Amino acid sequence: MKSVLVTGPGRVDVVEVPKPSPGPRDVLVRMRACGICGSDAYYVTIGGIPPRQGATPLGHEGAGEVVEVGAEVTGFAPGDHVVMNPLAPGSQLLGSGGPMGALSEYLVFRDAEPGRELRIIPRNLPFDLAAINEPMAVARHAVNRTAPQPGDTVAVFGAGPIGLGAVLGYRISGAKHVVVIDVQPARLEKALAIGADAVINSAEEDVAARLTELHGPGATVMGAPRAGTDIYLDAAGAPAVIDTALAAAKANATLGIVAVHKKPVPVDFGALLGVEPTIVTAMGYPQEIFQVTDDIVANQDRFGRIISHRFPFTDVLTALETAATPGAADKVVVTFD
C-alpha cells in the first residue's frame, strides 16, 4: 500500500510499504479521508519526530471504513464507518511519532475497543467532514476548559479551524454572544457564516472599544472601565492577543489559551491583581475526541464550512504544500478513492 512518510528534513515522500495484517483482536481500516494539521508541516520541517528512527508516517486526522475484524473483536463489523482517536493506546500515537500515519491507504488498530481507538459514525456523515473530528475535539476541549455558562459573552481570537470550531462549541454550550477577532476579511466572513454574532478586524478596529459596544461595559475590582466580555479564547498564537485580551478583561473574566506560542510571552501580573482573571490552557482532548462527534453529526452544514480545500490522495504532496503555505488555505482534507 501507499503511505506518506517524512524521509528527511523538509522532505516528504509517498512510498510503498507493507499492508498491515490484523490479528485476532485487531481491526483493519481502509482510509477514506484525512485532514492535514499544522503539526504535519512542522514534522516535515524538522525531518520527523525524535526519538523515532527512520522515516515518520504522517497524518492523524482520520476517518475510514472497517474492512476486516479479528475473530475475537466485538463491536465492529466490516462496512462500519469510523473516526479515530490518534492518542488512544491501540493507535500507537497515530501520525505523531508512532509506526502508523493516517495518510496511508490502510491502518490496523490493535486490541480495538469501541469508543477507545475508534468510534462508529452514521453513514450519512461524509468522510471528509468526519476527518475534522480530531481538530474539532481540540477546539471543544478549549471551550470546556473555559467553562462557559449559558448567557456568557465570548471573544475568540483567530478564525482558523480551531477558532471556528470553538465558535461552534461555544454556541452549542449556550453562549449568548460570540465575537471573532482576526485580520483576514475572508476568515471573518467565514466566522459569520458558521454562527459568530459579530466580527472584529483587529488591524482596523480598537478591539476593547468594539467589545464594549458589543458586550456592554465591565470594570476591574477597583472600578476601572473594561469590556463586559466574560470569556476570551486565544486560538491565534500571537503575543498581541494576550496583551489585548488582558488589557480588556473585566474582573473575574476567563482567558483560555489553545494556540501554540512558539516564543515566551511576557505578562504583567502586577497589573492583573485588580482583575483577578482565570487563565487556563488547553491541549489535546482528554474526553472530547468522541464527544465532539455528536456535535458534528448534528451540525454538518456549519462544521463543513470549516473545510476550505479537498485534494485526492493522488495529489497528497500538493495538499501538504498548500496546507503549509501561509494564507493559501484554512483546512485541507485529503480524500481516498
Image (spheres, rainbow, N blue to C red):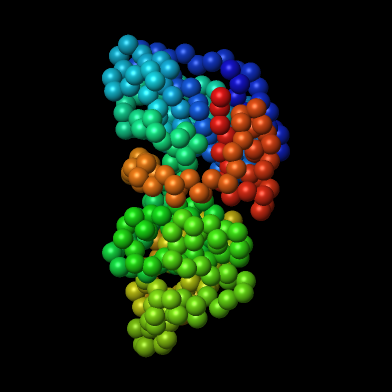
Residue at 32% across, 26% down: 113
* Residue at image point 63% right, 44% down: 323
Give coordinates of residue 32: x percent, y percent: 50, 28
Q: Which residue is depicted at the point 48% across and 45% down?
A: 304
Decide which of 8, 335 is in the foreground and name it: 335
Tell me where residue 201 appears, x and y as whole percent. Answer: 58, 69
Placement of 103 over or under 329, stated as above or below: above
Image quarter where the N terminus lies is top right
Considering only vertical position in the picture, is 134 above or below 174? above
Q: Position of residue 133 (x, y in %)?
A: 43, 41
Q: Where's the C terminus, which quadrant?
A: top right
Which of the 4 quarters of the picture holds residue 91? top left
Q: To which quarter of the image does residue 53 belong?
A: top right
Residue 171 vs residue 337: left or right? left
Residue at x 44% of width, y 24% of height: 65
User: As displayed, is residue 22 above or below residue 275?
Assistant: above
Q: Position of residue 50 (x, y in %)?
A: 58, 36
Q: In terms of image quadrants, where is residue 229?
A: bottom left
Q: Is residue 17 left or right of residue 31?
A: right
Taking depth in this image into account, of 329 and 60 the one nearest to the observer is: 329
Residue 122 vertical placement versus 71 (above, below): below
Please state which of residues 20 and 213 is positioned toward the viewer in this rendering. Answer: 213
Tag count:
0
Q: Nearer the viewer, residue 74 or 184?
A: 184
Can I make out residue 260 in this image? no
Using the rendered image of the protein, determine whether residue 114 is visible from the camera's viewpoint.
Answer: yes
Q: Residue furthest bottom?
A: 223
